[in-house]
Amino acid sequence: MDKLKFYSYPSCTSCRRTKSWLKSQGVDFNEQHLFRETPSADELKDILALTTQGIDEILAKRSKEYKALDIDVNELSLNEFLNLVIEKPKLLRRPILTNGEKLVIGYNLEGLRSITDNRMEYTANIS
């Protein structure tokens, strides 16, 4: 992966804080609007593969969308879950940042430092 992948929503405070921090550190990233360019099923599978808590880690359980659900997401198959999130991307916590090996959800300064420090060391070793 050439750059970090940054899934965001411009109106989200955590997204704006994360983006500001990344820019202040000179970190290159590819930004993808979560609602206009909803992650594909394959992208969501890649994100889920990096979680430690599975779907609970990426779901915005305090959101109106989640609270309005009339289903138990833990009862869904993987494909049903992926289709639900693609249909209702507001169910995702944000921002989501990944380098393909690590995942940071929300504005998490320690996580951001970890994912970018490792990336900078990797870049330095190649040069």
Image (spheres, helix red, strand yellow):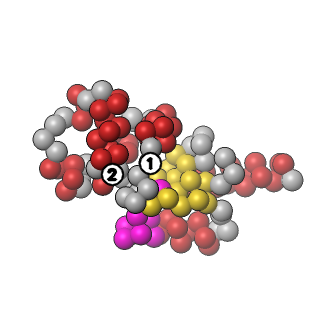
Give above or below for 125 relative to 35. Answer: above
Total count of labels: 2
Give above or below for 119 relative to 53. Answer: below
Picture coordinates of residue 100 (x, y %)? 59, 43
Instruction: Tell me if 89 is positioned left or right of 28 in this view.
Output: left
Q: Residue at x 52, y 46 (%)?
A: 103
Q: Looking at this view, is 74 or 125 the one in front?
A: 74
Q: Looking at this view, is 38 or 13 the one in front?
A: 38
Q: Secondary structure at mark 1?
A: loop
Q: Earlier in the sequence, mark 2 or mark 1?
A: 1
Residue 39's label in the rendered image is: 1
Instruction: State the separation of the CA atoms marked 2 and 1.
Output: 8 Å
What amino acid type is highlighted by mark number 1? Pro
Q: Residue at x 14, y 50 (%)?
A: 68
Asked which quadrant contains residue 24, the reply is bottom right
Instruction: Tell me if 84 is positioned left or right of 44 in this view.
Output: left
Please rate how many residues cluster around mark 1, counting C-alpha atoms within 10 Å: few if below 14, some from 14 to 19, many from 20.
Answer: some
Q: Residue at x 49, y 59 (%)?
A: 32
Instruction: Tell me if 44 is positioned left or right of 98 in this view.
Output: left
* Magenta-colored span: 7-16
Give above or below for 19 relative to 72. Answer: below
Residue 89's label in the rendered image is: 2
Picture coordinates of residue 88 (x, y %)? 28, 50
What amino acid type is highlighted by mark number 2? Pro
Q: Do callouts 2 and 1 mark residues in contact (Cβ within 8 Å)?
A: yes
Residue 59 in sight here: no
**Residue 22: in magenta span:** no
Picture coordinates of residue 114 (x, y %)? 60, 51
